[in-house]
Amino acid sequence: MAAPKPAPSARETELLELAYQYSLTHGLADLSLRPLATAIGSSPRVLLFLFDSKDGLIRALLARTRTDELELLREINSRYGDAPGLEVIARELWTWLAAKERRPLMTLWVEAYGRSLVAPEGPWADYARSTVDDWLELLATAQRKRERASRRGEARRTGVLAILRGALLDLLATGNKDRTTAAVEAYLAD
């Protein structure tokens, strides 16, 4: 059994955050260590030492992107009592997803999600699946217990997730927040 990885050093944490900010602008798919290291005031050798490999750095960056997503899910869960309803949670999620200041994060999320589907091995492994599971779990908590356990309840939360993600892709492609918000609202009203 491998020994657990020690807690990250202050420098590792600092460089990860700088690399995360860099990746919001430049993406991860074609990440090259030399330009990244130059941009964040480090060297490729230091990044390889701290993260073991380029794949290790990408895994750390993907985990960092999920940190924002998971924090949102925890925040929404703590704000509402028992089973506020899918519509309430979906509107909260859409407001967060569609915010202009989150476009770089959402673009990075789409890139990572897509890479996870076409390159399921290596650093991208299971990223898409884990984000689906995270969001479906949150949506399930919005449902009453009886609905949550039913096939219809599962189908309803899957539909809500699909509309949110489809509207997000459309928003990122077109920038048309009014139209995509109207689509989300129309779906939730049915």
Image (cartoon, helix red, strand yellow):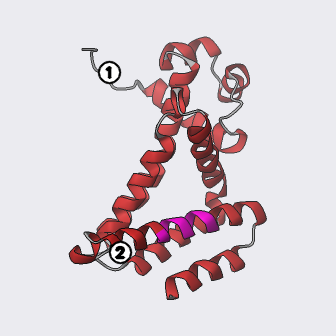
Tell which residue pokes out farthest to the bottom in this image.
Answer: 189
Q: Quadrant of the N terminus?
A: top left
Indicate the secondary structure of the residue bearing disc 2.
helix
State the residue in front, 138 or 126.
Answer: 126
Q: Amino acid at mark 1?
A: Pro
Residue drawn at x 61%, y 58% as measured from the top left: 102
Residue position for label 1 = 6
**Quadrant of the image occupied by residue 36:** top right
**Quadrant of the image occupied by residue 119:** top right
Tell which residue pokes out farthest to the right in this image.
Answer: 174
Residue 103: x %, y % from top left: 66, 58
**Quadrant of the image occupied by residue 26:** top right
Magenta stretch bounds? 159-167
Residue 132: x %, y % from top left: 45, 54
Label 2 crowd bin: few (<14), some (14–19), many (20+), radius 10 Å: few
Placement of 184 over or under 20, stated as above or below:
below
Looking at the rendered structure, the number of numbered marks drawn on it comes to 2
State the residue in front, 60 or 142.
Answer: 142
Indicate the secondary structure of the residue bearing disc 1.
loop
Residue drawn at x 46%, y 38% as measured from the top left: 126
Residue drawn at x 36%, y 68% as measured from the top left: 154
Residue 110: x %, y % from top left: 62, 50
**Circle on res. 153:** none
Left or right: 108, with 130 as reference point:
right
Chain-order first, disc 2 or disc 1: 1
Residue position for label 2 = 152
Residue drawn at x 50%, y 88% as measured from the top left: 190
Left or right: 148, with 99 as reference point:
left
Q: Main secondary structure of the magenta part?
A: helix
State the residue in front, 21 or 164.
Answer: 164
Tell which residue pokes out farthest to the front in this image.
Answer: 151
Residue 142: x %, y % from top left: 33, 73
